Amino acid sequence: MQKSINSHNSLKIWKIAEAEEETQKSLELKRRRFLTAIPILCIALAEILMFLGKVGIAIWIHIGIMVALSLSNVFIKDSEVQKIHQVLILLPLLRLINLSMPVFFETTLYTFIVIYGSLTIPIAFIIIHQRYSLEQIGISMKNIKTYMVLSIPLSLVLGFGEYLTIRAGYLIPDLTFENLLKLTFIMVFFVGLVEELTFRSILQTRLEQTLGIRESLLITTLLFGLMHSGYGTFYEILYTGFVGFFIGLAFYKTKSLPFIVVMHGFINVFLFGILPHYMTGGVGFCGIGF
């Protein structure tokens, strides 16, 4: 009889301990969501102000975000939150570098080498410091032939949809092989690679590990769309958000960085090269409004 009572008490204590552990995990997740939401909402606010033409205020908010995120590790001891904040620094940094370019020289195709090339150093630092594996960032040759074949028609469809949205001008004066090769190289190995490493390989992966796949897709979709506020059109933000969701879902399903980089790069090749030359509305050199 005594053994039965002891067994019952032990089971009751075990259940209480398990319930307390679940409560603690739930509270910890809520705290992580809150501490993640604050900088994301600030970045969103800055981009909305960009959209409304309040560039000066947006710049100061982005600077403030970078400073706050840099100092957050001093006050926040949760390593998962620290890693998310470290990754989020890349977004205001990208915006500030992008805005600084016209100060120095006229926007051309080669501007994007400077903008996106500058980000390779902090991206490499984050990947090494946070110890991302090759699998996590999507460096894989699995099914690569199939993905490469799929990437071109998908990029044409998505690029055509975006062209109808913003009627972008061309970044190359004609469709010679040399100009197309330059455009393709820059859009794939600079714009596509850096943006996909930032939004999908690093940010989406980190958010997925901490918050879950649904929230990671929602956040990266929102930020990817808002970070295209430079075009000044609400439809472009909606459309690039949709494209970001599609690419994010493709990355989640395939875990193939080459697939989404090539797809992203060729969306821009069609958008800023081929389509403006074959359809009405090409108005000359046009900067990407990221």
Image (cartoon, rainbow, N blue to C red):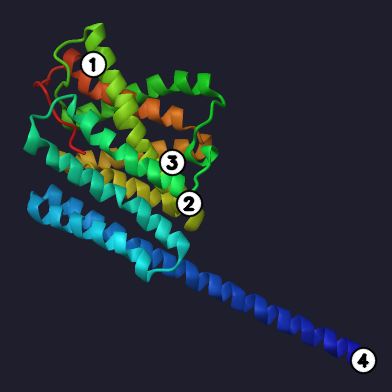
Q: Which residue is mark 3?
A: 201
User: Distance of mark 4 from mark 1, alpha carbons?
Assistant: 84 Å
Mark 2 or 4, which is nearer the eye? 2
User: Distance of mark 2 from mark 3, alpha carbons?
Assistant: 11 Å
- Image quadrant occupied by the C terminus: top left
Q: Which residue is mark 2?
A: 208
| Residue 274: image tag | 1
> Which numbered disc flags the more N-terminal residue, 1 or 3?
3
Asked if labels 4 and 2 touch by Cβ distance under 8 angstroms, the answer is no
| Residue 1: image tag | 4
Viewed as shown, does residue 131 lie left or right of 229?
A: right
> Which numbered disc flags the more N-terminal residue, 2 or 3?
3
Identify the amino acid type marked 3. Ser
Secondary element at tag 3 = helix
**Dot 4, crowdedness within 10 Å: few (<14), some or many (≥20)?**
few
Q: Taking the image as drawn, is residue 243 in sight?
A: no
Residue 231: % across, % down: 15, 38
> Which numbered disc flags the more N-terminal residue, 4 or 3?
4
Secondary element at tag 2 = helix
> Which numbered disc flags the more N-terminal residue, 4 or 1?
4
Residue 214: % across, % down: 46, 52
Residue 16: % across, % down: 67, 82
Mark 2 or 3, which is nearer the eye? 3
Identify the amino acid type marked 2. Glu
Identify the amino acid type marked 1. Ile
Residue 3: % across, % down: 90, 88
Residue pushed farthest top?
A: 176
Q: For the point 70% across and 79% down, which residue is it?
A: 15
